[in-house]
Amino acid sequence: MFDHLISKAQLGRFYSHLRGLGFEEIRPYAKGTTSLIFGARLDEKNVIIKLQRPDSPRQNFAREAKIVRTIEPFGITPPLVAYGVFEGLEYLIRGFAEGEIIFHADLEKRHLFEIVEKTALLDRLGLDHGQIQGGKHIIVGESVYLIDFEKANWRKPKNLTSAMAMIFLSDNYISRRVRAKFGIDEEFLDEMREGVRAYKRTGRLSGLLRLLSRL
């Protein structure tokens, strides 16, 4: 999977480095625009390892690690396990978020409430994720987690409004599935738009929560 992005020799050395830290069952998992992603086990728990791609000049895992460590007490994202540098390449290790990305997940009513609660909490913390509407950074399982804070920053947050636009208000694969599953009509969408506007004005969730309770 990574043959054209990192040499076998360097990859082998990285695996040896991780084994020395206690990680087992290390395996390629996916690749991103700036990172190579591995799965592994530590103390019988699944973890995700992000290694900076050798062809990527961007070095921002230290900042992401600091953000994850700041918000992990709130249960928004899996905990940070480790951050380090290997042969000049940054790496970040976090707990594995069990579930599926929202793009593929079968959303239940409780998931919608949890998405509202966690994105609103991020808003209150003043942290904007920056990539919520892409559909790849909300993981839905027994719990809901937001992942990959690589482009997040302490700026005016739009987490909840971005999530509501993706799930309900925009015309996309996710919103069409949600509308079909819950029988959502234009009246509901109009009320959702008003609920989002009210949230932006006041920061209150009561209108949105009442609306979701009707699904």
Image (cartoon, rainbow, N blue to C red):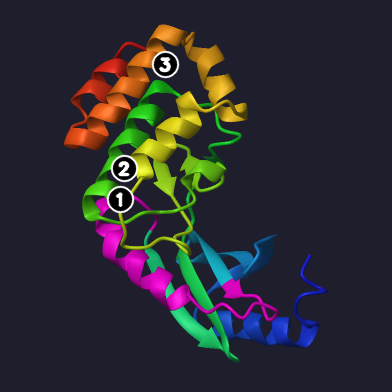
Q: Position of residue 112 (x, y in %)?
A: 39, 28
Q: Nearer the viewer, residue 78 or 66?
A: 66
Q: Residue furthest bottom?
A: 87
Mark 2 or mark 3, earlier in chain: 2
Question: Residue at left 66%, top 76%?
Answer: 53
State which mark lies toward you, 2 or 1: 2
- Residue in the image at 68% along x and 81% along y: 54
Task: Report the span colored magenta.
Answer: 51-78
On residue 75, which mark appears?
Answer: 1
Q: Are the two marked residues, 2 and 1, in contact with CB atoms closer than 8 angstroms?
A: yes
- Provide the residue designation for mark 3: 189
Mark 2 and mark 1 lie on one chain; the one further toward the N terminus is 1
Residue 107 in view: yes
The three-letter amino acid code for the residue at tag 2 is: Lys
In the displayed structure image, the side of residue 138 where residue 1 appears, left or right: right
Looking at the rendering, in which quadrant would you find the C terminus? top left
User: As displayed, is residue 99 above or below residue 177?
Assistant: below
Q: Is 91 on the left or on the right of 1, as rendered?
A: left
**Membership of 75 in magenta stretch:** yes
Q: Which residue is mark 2?
A: 118
